[in-house]
Image (tube, rainbow, N blue to C red):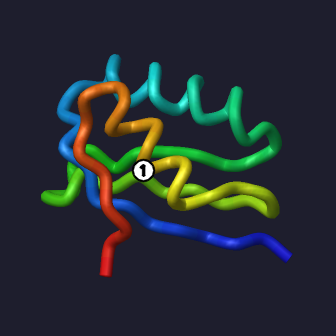
Amino acid sequence: MSIIEVFKTNVESANDASNIVNMLLGHFPGSKINFDLQDCDKILRVEGKDFSSDKIIVLLKENGFHCAILE
């Protein structure tokens, strides 16, 4: 059973998004991770069996980006 979590971010560039996806896949291999930078909330979507929403938020903040679970 996969879990899906959606985050609001301030990631603007496709290059930053690609780097973040690769970094997150290193921490949570086997997850499906993608951005929707066209959305006003710069959506980060993570689908997988074994990931931590809190850890994702911390990792993005450590890299200078805002990240919060989309309510």
Indicate the quadrant where residue 17 lies. top left
Q: Quickly name the residue at label 1.
A: 57
- 11 to the left or right of 62: left
Question: As drawn, which residue projects farthest toward the right?
Answer: 1
Indicate the quadrant where residue 65 lies. top left
Quadrant the C terminus occupies: bottom left
Taking the spot 49% from the left edge, 57% from the top edge, the residue there is: 45
Residue 64, horizontal then vertical, whole percent: 25, 28
In this orientation, which residue lies closer to the viewer: 24 or 40? 24
Taking the spot 66% from the left edge, 60% from the top edge, the residue there is: 47
Residue 5, horizontal then vertical, whole percent: 53, 68
Residue 46, horizontal then vertical, whole percent: 57, 56
**Mark 1 surroundings: few (<14), some (14-19) or many (≥20) residues within 10 A:** some
Query: Could you tell me the amino acid type at mark 1?
Result: Ile
Q: Is residue 69 above or below residue 39?
A: below
Taking the spot 13% from the left edge, 58% from the top edge, the residue there is: 40
Taking the spot 69% from the left edge, 34% from the top edge, the residue there is: 27
Q: Is residue 23 above or below residue 34?
A: above
